[in-house]
Image (tube, coloured by chain):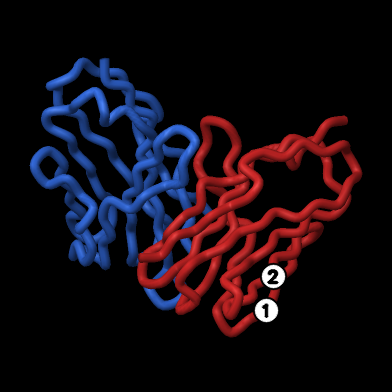
């Protein structure tokens, strides 16, 4: 069974540039999550989707971050414009449903903003 | 607000030793608690998930326990191996997964 797929794995951009990350969850998983992980810290939730609906985006900095999950499968997280402090690893995870909630993570995208 | 703490932040042991990693949480009204492993530059691998009604879960050399009343969970690793070297993260779920900062484990040959 294929796991959570993310691309790109690494991205280096200059500040004020836009960037986008893509995630394909495990087949059949209705719930998708985007997390941000700073060095030496545990991941922090940015947004959670139940199918196409964003049900928890309270931690998403909406002035520069946006996300979408069209058709309830793949998801894209965008930053525009990027700031130096956005340098981090962006992780995508999925779970079968909200009740059981065992989350499976992708390899992450390491973003460096210069 | 749920806070999850892991102590120690780093641990170095000789190969073959049994060890315990600690995780504490402030809000005992959790649905479950999950232990993950993270290798450098990689994503998180789910190791064990303990539902709130359970006391422990086992997988191979790993055993995780949960004591909701005291707000604690432990991950026991038996007969440690160099391949166990990684960062171990615990996370409580109360409608949202809240992570600790992790324990970086190094198992020396």
Could one spot residue A79 in this view of the protein? yes
Q: Nearer the viewer, residue B85 or A10?
A: B85
Residue density around tag 2, few if under 14, some if 14–19, many if 20 or more, within 10 Å: many
Chain with colour blue in the figure: A
Residue B54: x %, y % from top left: 63, 81
Residue B103, horizontal then vertical, whole percent: 62, 44
Instruction: Name the residue located 39 percent from the left edge and 35 percent from the top edge.
Output: A89
Q: Secondary structure at mark 2?
A: strand
Mark found first going from the N terminus, 2 or 1: 1
Crowd rating for badge 1 (residues with CA inside 10 Å; few <14, some 14–19, many 20+)? few
User: Circle 1 marks a residue in which chain?
Assistant: B
Instruction: Please tell me whether residue A83 is drawn above or below residue A5 in the rendered image.
Output: above
Q: Chain of mark 2?
A: B
C-alpha separation, residue under disc 2 versus residue under disc 1? 6 Å
Location of mark 1 (residue): B55
The furthest residue to the bottom: B53
Q: Residue at x 51, y 46 (%)?
A: B101
Residue B17 in the image: state x and y as whole percent.
89, 46
Tell whether A66 sits left or right of B96: left
x and y percentages locating residue A12 in the rendered image: 30, 18
Residue depicted at x 40% and y 36%: A38
Mark linked to residue B65: 2
* Chain B on-screen colour: red
Instruction: Say whether marks 2 and 1 touch (CB < 8 Å).
Output: yes
Side of B23 relative to A34 (left or right): right
Residue at the limit of the structure toward the left, as seen here: A63
Image height of B10 relative to B26, above or below: above
Labelled disc at residue B9: none
Looking at the rendered image, the quarter that the C terminus of chain B falls into is top right
Above or below — where is A72 with respect to A34?
below
* Quarter containing the N terminus of chain B: bottom left
Q: Which residue is outermost to the right?
A: B16
């Amino acid at each position: 069974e294929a796991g959570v797929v993310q691309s790109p794995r690494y991205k280096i951009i200059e500040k004020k540039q836009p960037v986008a990350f893509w995630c394909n969850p495990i087949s059949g998983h209705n719930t998708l999550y985007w997390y941000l992980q700073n060095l030496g810290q545990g991941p922090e939730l940015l947004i959670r989707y139940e199918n196409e609906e964003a049900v928890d985006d309270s931690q998403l900095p909406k002035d520069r971050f946006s996300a979408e999950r069209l058709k309830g499968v793949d998801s894209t997280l965008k930053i525009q414009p990027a700031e130096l402090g956005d340098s981090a690893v962006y992780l995508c995870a999925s779970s079968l449903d909200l009740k059981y909630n065992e989350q499976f993570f992708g390899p992450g995208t390491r973003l460096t903003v210069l | 607000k749920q806070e999850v703490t892991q102590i120690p932040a780093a641990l170095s042991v000789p190969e073959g030793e049994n060890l315990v990693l600690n995780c504490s949480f402030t809000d005992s009204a959790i649905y479950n608690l999950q232990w993950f492993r993270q290798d450098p530059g990689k994503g998180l691998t789910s190791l064990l998930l303990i539902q709130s009604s359970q006391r422990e879960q086992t997988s191979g050399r790993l055993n995780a326990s949960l004591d909701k009343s005291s707000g604690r969970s432990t991950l026991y690793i038996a007969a440690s191996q160099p391949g166990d070297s990684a960062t171990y993260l615990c996370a409580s779920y109360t409608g949202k997964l809240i992570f600790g900062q992790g324990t970086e484990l190094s198992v020396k040959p």
